[in-house]
Amino acid sequence: MKGTSLIAKDDIQVVDSVTDWKNAVRLASKPLLKDHTITKEYVDNMIQSVEDNGPYMVIADYFALMHARPGEGVNNLGMSLLTTKRAFDLEGKPVKIVLVLAATDNKSHLASLQKVMSVFMDDAAYQTVLNGSREEIVNLFEGLE
């Protein structure tokens, strides 16, 4: 993981809207592609997984935890976050938050994911991620290591 926070400031994006869920996944993945945490293969695998298995990655209201098989197209453990002001349809489920999880194996990401998910489990923090500014969202994750 780079920097001191689990989701680095540069890995958090807030946009008004996206054209569709595939573009949301690609946009959410951009910071991790840019710094070579993941490869394009990983992005393609996440999209293929939804096409094959449906919207199972939508794990809460408006929240999709995007991932693919650990290690395939993953160079380092990493996470990035995209929030859209307007919901988009992910195979029948409305989504506004896309958290991309890139894991190198089946276990090393679990502690980090648990810490990040603690933010999403807090109602006030979840509302901030849903409706807040990029700066407010960055502040939520800055203390987590």
Image (spheres, rainbow, N blue to C red):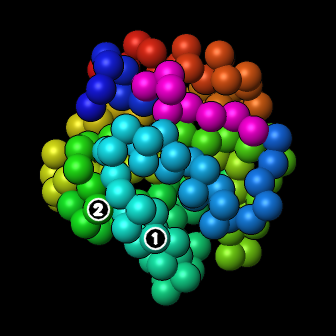
Residue ID at (55%, 82%)? 51
The residue where tag 1 is placed is 44
Q: Which residues are magenta?
A: 8-15
Whether the residues at callouts 2 and 1 have beta carbons within 8 Å, the answer is: yes
Residue 73's disc is 2
Say which quadrant the C terminus sits in. Answer: top left
Q: Number of callouts in the render? A: 2
Q: Residue at x 50, y 26 (%)?
A: 10
Percent position of residue 25, x then y: 57, 58
The reply to whether residue 121 is in sight is no
Q: Is residue 106 left or right of residue 117?
A: left
In the image, residue 6 lies at what x, y percent?
36, 28
* Relative height, residue 100 to residue 144 (above, below): below
Q: Residues within 10 Å of mark 2 (few under 14, many from 20)?
A: many
Hey, what amino acid is under mark 1? Answer: Asp
Q: Would residue 111 appear left or right of 79 to someone viewing this image? A: left
Q: Is residue 98 left or right of residue 71?
A: right
Q: Quadrant of the N terminus?
A: top left
SS for tag 2? loop
* Label located before the other in sequence (2 or 1): 1
Q: Residue furthest bottom?
A: 52
Q: Position of residue 135 (x, y in %)?
A: 65, 16
Taking the spot 79% from the left edge, 61% from the top edge, the residue there is 19
Q: Is residue 12 magenta?
A: yes
Question: Is disc 1 surrounded by few (<14), some (14 to 19) or many (20+) residues within 10 Å?
Answer: some
Could you tell me which secondary element the residue under label 1 belongs to? Answer: helix
Front residue of this view, candidates 22 and 39? 39
Residue 144 position (above or below residue 7): above
Distance between mark 2 and mark 1 Cα atoms: 9 Å
Residue 28 seen from this side = yes
